[in-house]
């Protein structure tokens, strides 16, 4: 598995960034589902309670066009 510094990852096109933590990915996906079923506030609280970084919470909940694509 390739590792990158945060600076390397920020410079990469989003399509090349890899999720390195499957558990975090699952939590984020559940947070997105919570937003759809309940509210953005509930989703924020869920993600915060699971230690998701604030920048990730903002990106996935407030900017869906910036979410990573799920491979099919």
Image (spheres, rainbow, N blue to C red):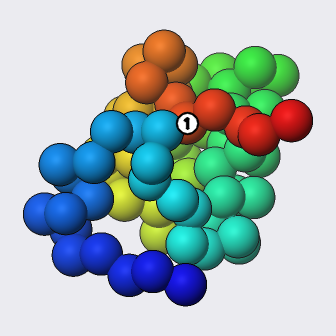
Q: Horizontally, is 34 left or right of 50 in the view? A: right
Q: How many numbered marks have been drawn onto this rendered protein structure?
A: 1
Q: Horizontally, is 37 left or right of 12 in the view? A: right
The secondary element bearing badge 1 is classed as loop
Residue reaching furthest left?
7
Residue 45 lies, in percent from the top left, at 54, 47
* Residue positioned 48% across, 15% down in the render: 65
Pick the front one: 58 or 3: 3
Quarter of the rendering containing residue 32: top right
Pick the front one: 33 or 46: 33
Mark 1: give few (<14), some (14-19) or many (20+) Cα within 10 Å.
some
The answer to whether residue 47 is seen in the rendering is yes
Residue 6 lies, in percent from the top left, at 21, 68
* Residue positioned 78% across, 32% down in the render: 33
Q: Is residue 59 above or below residue 6?
A: above
The answer to whether residue 49 is seen in the rendering is no
- Report which residue position mark 1 lands on: 68
Q: Horizontally, is 72 left or right of 58 in the view? A: right
Pick the front one: 19 or 13: 13
* Residue positioned 56% across, 62% down in the render: 19
* Residue positioned 86% across, 35% down in the render: 72
Q: Is residue 50 above or below residue 38?
A: below
Give the quarter of the figure containing the N terminus: bottom right
Residue 63 lies, in percent from the top left, at 42, 19
Q: Is residue 24 above or below residue 65?
A: below
């Amino acid at each position: 598995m390739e590792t990158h510094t945060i600076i390397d990852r920020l410079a990469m096109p989003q399509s090349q960034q890899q999720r390195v933590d499957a558990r975090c990915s699952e939590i984020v996906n559940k947070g997105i589902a919570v937003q759809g079923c309940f509210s953005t506030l509930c989703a924020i609280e869920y993600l915060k309670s699971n230690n998701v970084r604030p920048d990730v919470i903002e990106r996935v909940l407030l900017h869906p066009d910036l979410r990573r694509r799920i491979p099919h």
